[in-house]
Image (spheres, rainbow, N blue to C red):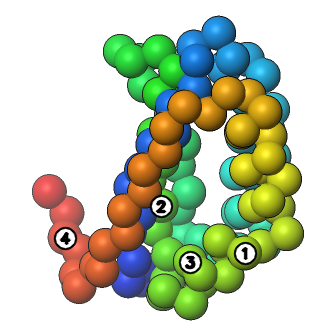
């Protein structure tokens, strides 16, 4: 399946809250893969910036991304993130016209 949408973003939490964030994040990622039709949904803690969690996502189309944003598992995740002290968030979606190996 070819991706037509790529999303990159981050969430920032107090570093001391990351242990509390991880189980909620795991639930989000598993539900997204199981239900939302994503091609890739990768999440990682930044090794050099404690408290920063980076996201990279590939979606088959805008409609799949829009459905993900209102999926039943999103609001519980957002509530949990706020409860864990979410400090900042930024996500940007891009249209993917073609891809090639580098």
Residue at x-position 67% and y-position 82%: 67
N-term mark: 4 or 2 = 2
Residue at x-position 50% and y-position 75%: 59
Q: Are marks 4 and 1 in contact (CB under 8 Å)?
A: no
Q: Secondary structure at mark 4?
A: loop
Above or below, 57 against 64 in this view is: above
Q: Is residue 31 visible?
A: no
N-term mark: 4 or 1 = 1
Q: What is the distance, in whole Å, between disc 4 and disc 3 at their CAs?
A: 22 Å
Q: Nearer the viewer, residue 58 or 73?
A: 73
Residue at x-position 74% and y-position 28%: 84
Q: Disc 3 marks which residue?
A: 65
User: Quarter-wise, where is residue 39 in the image?
Assistant: bottom right
Q: Secondary structure at mark 1?
A: loop
Q: Are marks 3 and 2 in contact (CB under 8 Å)?
A: yes
Q: Secondary structure at mark 2?
A: strand
In front: label 1 or label 3: 1
N-term mark: 4 or 3 = 3
Q: What is the distance, in whole Å, between disc 3 and disc 2 at their CAs?
A: 9 Å
Q: Disc 2 marks which residue?
A: 57
In front: label 2 or label 1: 1
N-term mark: 1 or 3 = 3
Q: Residues within 10 Å of mark 3 (few under 14, many from 20)?
A: many
Residue 100, label in figure = 4
Q: What is the distance, in whole Å, between disc 4 and disc 2 at their CAs?
A: 17 Å
Q: Secondary structure at mark 3?
A: helix
User: Quarter-wise, where is residue 23 in the image?
Assistant: top right
> Would residue 47 be found to the left or right of residue 67 on screen?
left
Q: Residues within 10 Å of mark 4 (few under 14, many from 20)?
A: few
């Amino acid at each position: 399946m070819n991706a037509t949408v790529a999303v990159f973003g981050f969430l920032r939490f107090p570093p001391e809250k990351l242990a509390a964030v991880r189980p909620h994040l795991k639930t989000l990622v598993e539900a997204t893969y199981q239900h939302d039709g994503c091609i890739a949904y990768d999440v990682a803690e930044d090794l050099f910036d404690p408290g920063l969690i980076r996201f990279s996502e590939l979606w088959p189309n805008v409609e799949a991304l829009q459905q993900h944003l209102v999926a039943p598992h999103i609001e519980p995740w957002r509530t949990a993130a706020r409860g864990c002290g979410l400090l900042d968030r930024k996500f940007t979606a891009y249209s993917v016209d073609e891809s090639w190996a580098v």
